[in-house]
Each structure stands twice: as C-alpha cells, then as structure tokens.
Amino acid sequence: MKKRSSTPWTHRYSRPIMAGLATVGAVVTAYLTVIKFTQGSAACPTKGCDIVLASPYATVFGLPLALFGFLAYASMVVFAVAPLLVNSQSNKALRSKLENWTGLLLFAGGTAMMVFSGYLMYLLAFEIKAVCIYCVGSAILSALLFTLALLCRDWQDIGQLFFTGFIVVTVVLIGTLGVYINTKTPAIADSSHSTEQPSPGGYPITTSSGKAEIALAQHLKQIGAVFYGGFWCPHCHDQKQLFGREAVKDIPYVECDPKGINPQTKRCQAAGIQGYPTWVINGKTVTGTQSLEELAQLSGYKGPRNFQNSLPAAK
C-alpha cells in the first residue's frame, strides 16, 4: 500500500493563491494608475478615494504611487508562477532552484509591501484622514501575501530569513521616510518666485486677461467649481497668472490659510484639501496648476479658447 504524500496544503496551494491575490492587486492598482493619469474620479462609496488620489502622498518621483504598486504586484505574480511553469519530473533541479530563489523573493516582496502598506495606513489615519477602500484592500492583500510567503515552503535557514526580513524592513522604512519627508509642503508646478512672504492678498497678478480667460472664469463660477489655495502658494499664483488681472476677480477661489484675506479654513478642512492648488470641478478633484485648456475640458466649457496666457516653461 502506497503511503500518501504528507506535503502540507500550504506548500501545494500557496503559490497559486498568491498569484491570484497578486493579480487582483495588479488589476486594482492598474485601474488607479489610469484614474490618476487621466485625472478622473475613482469608483468609490466615499469621497476618501479621490481625496487620497489628490493628495501629495499619491505621487512619487512625479509618477502615481499606484503605478509602483502595480509593478510590485506584477512582480509577485511572476515570482509565484515561475516555478509552476517548470515540469518537476523532467527538470527537477531547475524547479527546485526556482522554488528556492523565488521563495526568498516572495518573502522579501511580501515583507516590503506589508511594511509600506502599514505606513500608508498611518498616513490615512493621521495625515490624510480619509477612508480609501482601495488602500485598505491593498494593505490586506499585502498582509496575506506576506503570510503565504512564509507558509509556502520549509525554511531551512531561519537565521537567513530573519536577516533578510530585517534588511528589507530597514531599507523600506528609510526609503519611505526619505521620499515623504517633505511631502507636507505642496510642490506641484515648476515656478520661480521671490522667497519673501507675500502680503495676505498674495503675489501681484502681472498678466492681463483676454475675452477667453474672462469667459472661462465666469463659466467655472457658474457651474460651482472651486479653486482651493493659499495666499503664499507660488503655484496658486501661477494659476491666477494664467487667468490674468481681469479674470481673476471671477475665479471661484477659496483661501485656505487663516492668515489670508477672507479665509475659509474650515471649508478647506471639510473638503479634505491636502495640497495647493486644488480644483473641484463637477465632482472631480485635481491638484496642481492646470492649464486653461485643461480647465475648459474638465468643466465642459464651450466658449472661445484662444487663451493668451500659458504655463511657464519647465527649467
């Protein structure tokens, strides 16, 4: 009578399960990446998802954070599936080698993703103060991937495992803190302004307005669009410069800094504003200095578009 294999189910099924979970994560992060690039609104039961996507924490090195999440999940799919593609009967040595290497990579990847997701949960709770189902879901997926990576095989050298985990945690924490250390100060549009603090009324507007700029400003006001900013914010000044002196009077501007003129700080807090400038147009939230053409497209503006002012060239 043949003795049945005593291989634990976690060893047999953990990799397919991890591949499935990572695929779900890859699909969701790909969706969020597209939303971020197109400046759309995410399908979400609360406003928290759009608030998070509009926050400065959602962008790393000028790219959507979700894009890096997609790459991480896609890598986990590859690591989980790679050994399964090799026939264990005819290529036993190669299969064993792949299981060893990818097993360690799955553990390192799962550890990194779980630690980073933990930091993101901290940001959601204490900095952004919004609920994002995609972020919470990703954190749960990361924890599951980490757990399954631990259970997918018998670890011969526990010391190496702990050492690898320690190195990964240290690198992720240092890297994350380094990336986000200055995030609270919005840095959205490239511009050069005087380092002197402006008056509560902001920097002076030096450009003039054409009929198109005035018409767009009036249109934005009519449809209930809102432009949140701070008097000291150079990028908000860039936005006003695009409209010009005459049109800026019609911009639906809300001052968020209590030291500015006619501040509406509570309104800004209620809207979850994390960076300046922030526009809310037809229910969509976009951050950064927007070209007038972009504002026209977002707001459904049908008037003249021969705008005479443009964004400053990047240096």
Image: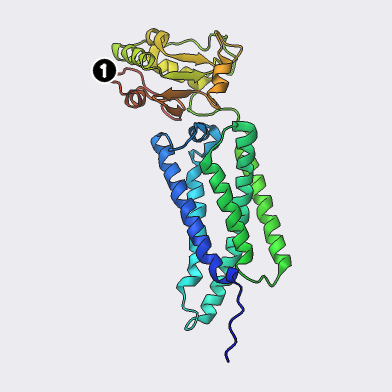
Is 306 placed left or right of 152 in the picture? left
Corner quadrant of residue 181: top right
Corner quadrant of residue 305: top left
In the image, 1 versus 205, the foreground residue is 1
In the image, 53 versus 241, the foreground residue is 53
- Is residue 128 something that shows in the picture? yes
- For disc 1, the marked residue is 303
- Estimate how packed mark 1 is, as few (under 14), some (14 to 19) or many (20 or more) residues with alpha carbons within 10 Å: few
The quadrant of the picture occupied by the N terminus is bottom right
Which residue, as the protein is rendered here, is positioned at the far front? Answer: 1
- Image coords of residue 257 (percent x, y): 58, 16
> Image point 50% across, 47% down: which residue?
68
Q: How is the image coloured?
A: rainbow
In the image, 7 versus 95, the foreground residue is 7
- Image coords of residue 10 (percent x, y): 59, 68
Which residue, as the protein is rendered here, is positioned at the far bottom? Answer: 1
Three-letter code for the amino acid on which mark 1 is drawn:
Gly
> Image point 41% across, 19% down: which residue?
225
- Give the secondary structure at mark 1: loop
Is 284 placed left or right of 163 in the picture? left
Corner quadrant of residue 243: top left
- Is residue 107 something that shows in the picture? no
- Image coords of residue 106 (percent x, y): 58, 61
Considering only vertical position in the picture, is 193 above or below 20?
above
What is the tally of numbered marks visible in this picture? 1
> Image point 62% across, 70% down: which residue?
153
- Image coords of residue 112 (percent x, y): 61, 53
